[in-house]
Amino acid sequence: MLVLKNITKVYEPNIVALDNVSFEVNSGEFVLLIGKSGAGKTTLLKILRREEEPTKGAVYFKNKNLLELSRRRLGEIRRKISAIHQDFKLLNKKTVFENIALPLEILGKSAKEIKNEVYKIAEKLKIKSKLDQIAETLSGGEKQKVCLARCLISKPEIILADEPTGNLDPIATYEFIEILKEINKDGVSIILATHNKEIVESLKTRVLTLDSGRLIRDENPGKYTLI
């Protein structure tokens, strides 16, 4: 489904963030991306949605080279490759409903369709009672569920999660990871960047390890080594 070929990213003056990274992600996979701070995890995830341009290399989604797409076609692809972040990126003065509904409003969906979809997603993530609440008043775990709901409402095929539990307490972290596992069971591919050793050990799934911008390990469950 997703193929990276020889991705290199160099920032001025001569800072190598990614160095010749290549790998593939199959439909329905749950992949962990680990490595020390500055290893290149966030840069890599941004390149996967073309929020950053690589210095060289190619990214293919369903055999389409993302680096060759027009802005309109890229927008369509980004709805299929959604992202969630550690810092939530919510509209803090808006309600939970308004935050979740935003992608459908941008697409010009009817008010009835938006309401139906928002309620359906909110019920699935157990935040239906929070729909009228202002986003900035939520707990960290609730905010991350709203981010995930906003992501899911576009019916993505891949979710890129960049340290999504970094600001959550252990209980909220466990709940969030369990939700991601259920979403993955529904067929959505997930690439999760994390520093959390407990998450890596509990998921027992494929692990990609970055070190100084290089992919140094691509390991099967039970064989990874944290660095």
Image (tube, rainbow, N blue to C red):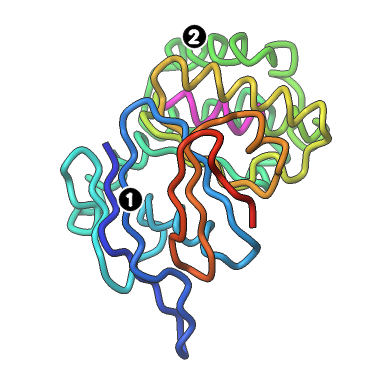
Disc 2 to disc 1: CB gap under 8 Å: no
Identify which residue is drawn at 53% across, 65% down.
211
- Pick the quarter of the image with the C terminus: bottom right
Q: Nearer the viewer, residue 124 or 118?
A: 124
Q: Position of residue 23 (x, y in %)?
A: 33, 50
Would you say the magenta stretch is mainly helix, strand or loop? helix
Which structural element holds mark 1?
strand
State which region is magenta.
145-154
Label 2: few (<14), some or many (≥20) within 10 Å?
few
Amino acid type of the residue that numbered disc 2 sits on in the rendered structure: Asn
- Which residue in the protein does label 1 denote? 23
Identify which residue is drawn at 44% across, 58% down.
44
Residue 179: quadrant of the picture: top right
Q: Is residue 177 left or right of residue 186?
A: right
Which structural element holds mark 2?
helix
In the rendered view, would you say 184 is above or below 31?
above
Q: Is residue 68 left or right of residue 159?
A: left
* Residue 100 within the segment the image draws in magenta: no
Q: Nearer the viewer, residue 128 or 43?
A: 43
For residue 116, the mark is 2
Amino acid type of the residue that numbered disc 1 sits on in the rendered structure: Phe
